[in-house]
Amino acid sequence: MKYRNSLILLGLLALPVSLAAQTPAMSADAAAAEIDRDAIEGPVRFLADDLLEGRGPASRGDELTQLYLSTTLEMLGYEPGGEKGSYLQTFDIVGIDSKPPQTWDFTKGGQKVSLKNFDQFIAASGVQKDRSVIQNAELVFVGYGIQAPEFQWDDYKGMDLKGKVLVMLNNDPEGDPKLFEGNRRLYYGRWTYKYESAARQGAAGAIIVHTTPSAGYAWQVVQTSWTGEQFELPAENEPRIQVSAWTTEEAARQIAKLSGHDLDALIKQAQSRDFKPVPLGVTTSLTLENKISRKKTANVGGLLRGSDPKLKEEVVVYSAHHDHLGIGEPDKEGDKIYNGALDNAAGTAQVLAIAKAFAALPEPPKRSILILFVAAEEQGLLGSEYYSKHPTFPAGRIAANINYDGGNIFGPSAEVAFIGMGKSSLDQVVKTLAAKQSRQVVGDQFPDKGFFYRSDQFNFARIGVPAIYLDTSTKLKGKPEEYGKEKIEAWEAAHYHQPSDELTPDWNYDGMIDDARLGFYAGLQIANTDQLPAWNPGDEFEAARKQAIQQAGK
Ligand SMILES: [Zn+2]
């Protein structure tokens, strides 16, 4: 604020020109200067405070977060951008708290393997009912559980899997670089796909074998993400399995051995297109007692109406999820509050700073700007899923989504990582603007982790909206190549989804300031360009876009 006023003041002193004589570029730069350290650090300090109790969905911390974000948007001059004249878009979530037994038994002949809850397996309910039941079901190893006609791949080969428990590998086959885009993780490699795929087969349950490389994260992340109350959007008519489970690799080895197989040999078979499901001859039963609750949470939206009479009916949506994991299992220090400072107070703060910059423009851009803080991301992108099913603008009128999840706390970067690069005309927008910051744009630096499908831009892409997700680059200014990568990986190993994801004095804001300014300029340009952004021909989301634009009557 100070910087901008003093610039204007200098202009007035030096030249007898009015404020209106500022060129659009000058006013955009002055607005971008609103994005500074204070604009980001302040909101992070509030949202990541212990008083917010980790912002778990439908908690007091969640409500405080909604109130803080909506009143801040109001203060910045944004109109209510939720539903029914409110800043909130409230929706139901179904909480399922499953109590698995302490042990889960697998038997063959007279022999038995007993797995320990939490240490060796995690089991969550696949149904929104008081009980999930697997009764004497046979285990079948189904490789990756993938059916992908475009790669002529079908792990099921027409086998009847009704009532079975499917043992599946995470990720997708790695061997052939032409298959499943090499080591880039597609949707087929995500756990959501795995359980949906098992449900389509009529299976009773599915067990994903966890390995750190195939999941992209350690077993402790599975533990913390899958225990305690889990939330979903209310069930509709989609097929569902009774139990969604994970086991450790070591536990899967025991089960394989019990069945007379070797896990490594099974994994090897699964790399081939000729793979057929392997009945393991092992049976199991499992009952989960579930406590079902229905609660409400809300996306928070603020709208800045566009200045063009026609284009204001279209919108650029900025998003960041405002929730985190709440209160959960204590860590070694006894800390139970999962503050989510980086994940995602940092992203929320960057989007708030961008909102402040747009509010500082002398005139809004041609298209409208929606600042959207989505809820319940950590539970499986629920807030953005709800928004994508109930968008406040028709999907075909959403020009683009710019999403922030996390932020660069390690220092200014020579590059910016653009998750989703190579997919749409937005590449050019980001590259041109990053060049003005003397920065290079690189694609996903951890392509094996499938980040494009792991945050809220994915739900926008599913309804056809081209998306930008800016992420921390590994190449930090003035540091050797490996430094950034090591920093990011060390942070992930120690703090990702842990109570220790807290605001600490060593945070460096320069990278986030650059990334937020870049996103601001990108959205401004998209909002002022007559042509709508488009997916590259043949992209997996191109068909959805065409349909959405047709429906919006463009
Ligand atoms: Zn997260």
Image (spheres, grey):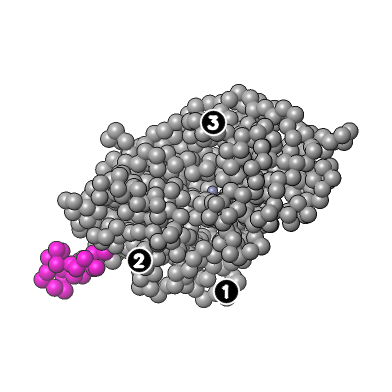
Residue occupying the point 46% across, 50% down: 458
Q: Can residue 118 be seen in this view?
A: no
Residue occupying the point 51% across, 52% down: 453
Q: Residue 429 carries which label?
A: 2
**Residues shaded magenta:** 9-28
Residue nearest the observer in this picture, 251 or 9: 251
Q: Residue 95 carries which label?
A: 3
- Residue 145 falls within the magenta-colored stretch: no
User: Mark 1 = which residue?
Assistant: 481
Q: Which amino acid does label 3 sit on?
A: Gly
Q: Which callout, 1 or 3, points at the residue further toward the start of the chain?
A: 3
Classified by dominant secondary structure, the portion drawn in magenta counts as helix
Q: Look at the numbered disc 2 and give the secondary structure of its residue.
A: helix
The image position of residue 18, as x and y in percent, is 12, 65
Dot 2 and dot 3 residues touching (CB under 8 Å): no
Residue nearest the observer in this picture, 341 or 314: 314
Q: Which mark is residue 40?
A: none
